Amino acid sequence: MTVAAPPGATLPPPTAVRTRGTCQSGHRPQRNPPAPRPPDHARLKARLRPKRGLKQFRSAARITAGHAFVQNLRRGHYDLATDTAPPLRLATAFTELALAM
């Protein structure tokens, strides 16, 4: 069932009324569009972060030696903190080393 308008009344057209400044899809064009966003700089910095250190062989050698020392302490290869449980061995060994110095 369709509803008829009273005699003498004018109806708006069935499509949406277009005003000046809008395109057919309804978007409003901007006079000055926003500037393009710069690419994400954080990703670049995150990729370069590991490459900052260890530029000399001496620093790489010290890091490697320290890592090996900690692994040997955890595994109980030294007579430091051998009587403690393995999860607490490293902390106890460093406490013993600090007292010895």
Image (spheres, helix red, strand yellow):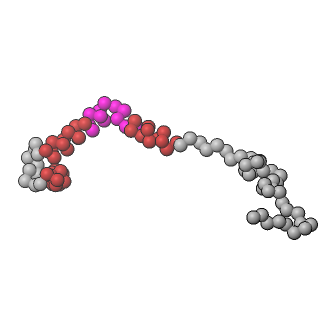
In the figure, 51 relative to 2: above or below?
above
Q: Which quadrant: the N terminus?
A: bottom right
Q: Residue furthest front?
A: 1
Q: Is residue 78 left or right of residue 46?
A: left
| Highlighted range, magenta | 52-63
Q: Residue at x 11, y 45 (%)?
A: 76
Residue that appears at 49% across and 44% down: 42
| Number of marks in picture | 0
Q: Is residue 97 left or right of residue 19?
A: left
Instruction: Kindly tell me whether residue 98 is visible in this rendering.
Output: no
Q: Is residue 60 shown in magenta? A: yes
| Percent position of residue 79, x then y | 8, 46
Residue at (18%, 50%) from the top-left corner? 90
Q: Can residue 34 be spotted in the picture?
A: yes
Residue 3 appears at what percent x and percent y? 79, 66
> What residue is at 22 percent from the left and 37 percent from the top?
65
Q: Residue furthest right?
A: 8
Percent x, y for residue 11? 85, 62
Spot the residue most to the top. 57
Name the one closer to the observer, 75 or 55: 75
- Left or right: 85, with 54 as reference point: left
Asked if residue 67 is among those painted magenta in the image, a careful observer would answer no
Place of residue 7 in the rendered image (x, y in percent of width and height, measured from the top left) = 90, 67
Q: Nearer the viewer, residue 42 or 6?
A: 6
